[in-house]
Structure formats: structure tokens, C-alpha cells
Image (cartoon, rainbow, N blue to C red):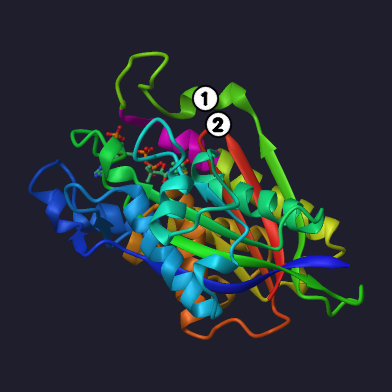
Amino acid sequence: TRRSVIRGTGHYLPERVVDNSWFESRLDTTDEWIRSRTGIEQRHFAAEGQTTSDLAIRASRAALNKAGLTADDIDGIILATSTPDFTFPAVATMVQAGLGIKSGFAYDVQAVCAGFVFALANADAMIRSGMANRVLVIGAETFSRIMDWTDRGTCVLFGDGAGAVVLEAQDGDGTKADRGILASDLNSDGQYRDLLYVDGGVSSTGTAGQLRMQGNLVFRHAVDKLAKTAHAALDKAGLQPDDVDWLVPHQANLRIITATAQKMNLPMENVILTVAEHGNTSAASIPLALSVADGQGRFRQGDIVVTEAIGGGLSWGSVIIRW
Ligand code: ACO
């Protein structure tokens, strides 16, 4: 069987680090509230003029480097973002140009915080069908650009950053030991638009808009839907929750992550956590967490790694990887 294996990971975080006390002087909030309700201690914000494609290019270079490949080795780029540099062209094409690649495809996927999981499943389908051999899959965001800085219920939650993986075709022998992406489960339900959306856009207001969220409702959907999608994906892979070595969840809120791990019967030692340092970086959070953990040498070959995410749409999903 032809499978998609992660050959390298990389990430980039903007230099500017903002801790919770920064918000204390601007809003009616406290470090204690933010830490206890979300687990977030700090986040990175892009500098003025620094765009999503800038972050993505740096993360991509790091992933190529780790994979021991050059830009010429890539057949295509799929980039997940909700905060593109421009309405068009796709950020992926700007990454392509930035890396000096002149052939192959490059396009964006928009599924908000679930974007990376959707992009990864998309790239995997292309690789398994033979449409591509090596795909750069990126999650990159500058959510600081769509914050309402007067809304304490949202602006303390998000950060900027980018993560990337090089996904590569590998022919296995069809046995259980085959590495790579084993299964994916993707879901959307557009009736929940008003729970989490940006109140602007080209065809509605003609402005970029700001993020609006009914946090407690999103929270309830998250815990329920994340455990379900992870179980569904494990089921498709023919695996049990017991088989899971690592959970790499979307890093939105420590309480959501803890509740999901509990539902999956997984001890917190097996969960990769970056939410304290990065905040919620939307589509970038999972590739960032993968890259950080990979850099620490935490994944061993053969480990079962479960990614799961939920975001605006609502859209949610899970991808199961044998590392
Ligand atoms: N500081 C102090 N108080 C605050 C703050 C803050 N920063 N934010 C909200 N509060 C207050 C509220 O005003 C409310 O006060 P009230 O009771 O006087 O009305 C109180 O805290 C409780 O508010 P809730 O919203 O019920 O608090 P909750 O425990 O649900 O925590 C939070 C809020 C952190 C937003 C939580 O609901 C959450 O994390 N939800 C999920 C959000 C999420 O994951 N979103 C991302 C999804 S991914 C994507 O697609 C972008």
C-alpha cells in the first residue's frame, strides 16, 4: 500500500512574546483568569508588516531542512489559513514563490482551526491516489489581525505562528507496521456559523472584520465532537483508544484538551501541550505542536499519533498517523 509519511516538521513563531499581564493593563481581566480558564500564559504576535506568508515560508524552510530536502523536491503546497495576506492569490502560492518553486500546485484550505487536519487529509488523498509524491502541508495564521481588542472573551485567546510538515509517498508492505497516515475523519456542520465567525469579508461588508465567538457554546461542542471524531478515525484505522501513544490536539484551551483526553481514557503524559506558550494559533496549532514535540524527540518510529481539531463552521476532524 502506498502511504503518506511525515518526513520532516518545522515551525516559526514571531519574535514578539506577549504575556497575560499585557492584557491586565488594557482590559478588565487578570493573568489568573486567563491561566485558570484557558491554560494560556503567553502568545506570539507578528510584527507590523509581517504577514501569514512570511511566517509560513520560515516554517516551510525549517521543515524542508529537517527532512533533508530542498524546495525542488516538492510537488505541491497545501496551506491552511483563515488569515491570508490577500483575498487572493492563495498564500500557498506566495510560499511557493518565496521558496523559489516554479512548478507544481499551490492552494489554500479554509477550515479555520480544523484547517490543518483538513489540509493533511487532502494531501494524503492526493499522495495515495498518485497525484503527488511530496506535498508541503502548512498551517499559518496571524489571528492578531482579526481581534477585537475590546472583547476580553476572545482577544486573550489567540496567537500568531506557523507550522509545516513534508508529507511523502512511501510504499509499504501492507502489514500493520506500515508507517504514515492510517485514516482521517472530516466533518462540517454549517448551521453553527454564529457560534464562531468573523463579521466581515469581501462579499458581505467589504472589510476584514473581527472574530466573534460564543465561547461557552463552542466549548460544549468541542468536547463532544473532538472525542467522537478521534474515535471515528481510530475505528477507520482499525485501532482502539488503547493503541494511542500521543494525542496532538488543536491547542485552543487546556480544559477542552483535558476533557477530550479523559473521554479517550488517555493520561495527560501522552498529550502534547503548547497552548501555554502559543495560545490558540488556529490552523497553525497542530503543526506547531507536532514540530515542537518532534524537535524534542518525543515521537518514536511506529508510535500512533492522533491529531484532532475543531473550529469555525463548525468544522472538525481527526487524522491518525503511525510515526
Ligand atoms: N477575563 C475575565 N473575565 C472574562 C474574560 C477574561 N478575559 N473573558 C470572559 N470573562 C467573563 C465573562 O464575561 C463571564 O462573566 P459573567 O459571568 O459576568 O458574564 C465569565 O467570564 C464567564 O464567561 P464564559 O464565557 O461562560 O467562560 P468560560 O468558562 O466558558 O470560558 C472561554 C470562556 C475561555 C472562551 C471558553 O468558553 C472557551 O475556551 N471556549 C472555547 C473557545 C475555543 O476553543 N475557541 C476556539 C475554537 S477554534 C477556532 O475555530 C477559532
- Label 2, on which residue? 313
- The residue under the point 46% across, 39% down is 90
Asked if residue 317 is among those painted magenta in the image, a careful observer would answer no
Q: Where is residue 310 drawn, in percent x and y?
A: 56, 45
Whether label 1 lies within 8 Å of ligand 1 gets the answer no
**Ligand 1 quadrant?**
top left
- The residue under the point 42% across, 32% down is 88
- Label 1, on which residue? 193
The quarter of the picture where the N terminus appears is bottom right
- The residue under the point 79% across, 66% down is 3
The amino acid sitting under disc 2 is Gly
**In the rendered image, which quarter is residue 214 located in?**
top left
- The residue under the point 56% across, 56% down is 259
**In the rendered image, which quarter is residue 237 located in?**
bottom right
Magenta extent: 210-220
The quarter of the picture where the C terminus appears is bottom right
Whether label 2 lies within 8 Å of ligand 1 gets the answer yes
The amino acid sitting under disc 1 is Arg
Left or right: where does residue 55 sit relative to residue 10? left
Q: Where is residue 208 drawn, in percent x and y?
A: 31, 27
Q: Element type at marker 2?
A: loop
- Label whose residue precedes the other's in the sequence (1 or 2): 1
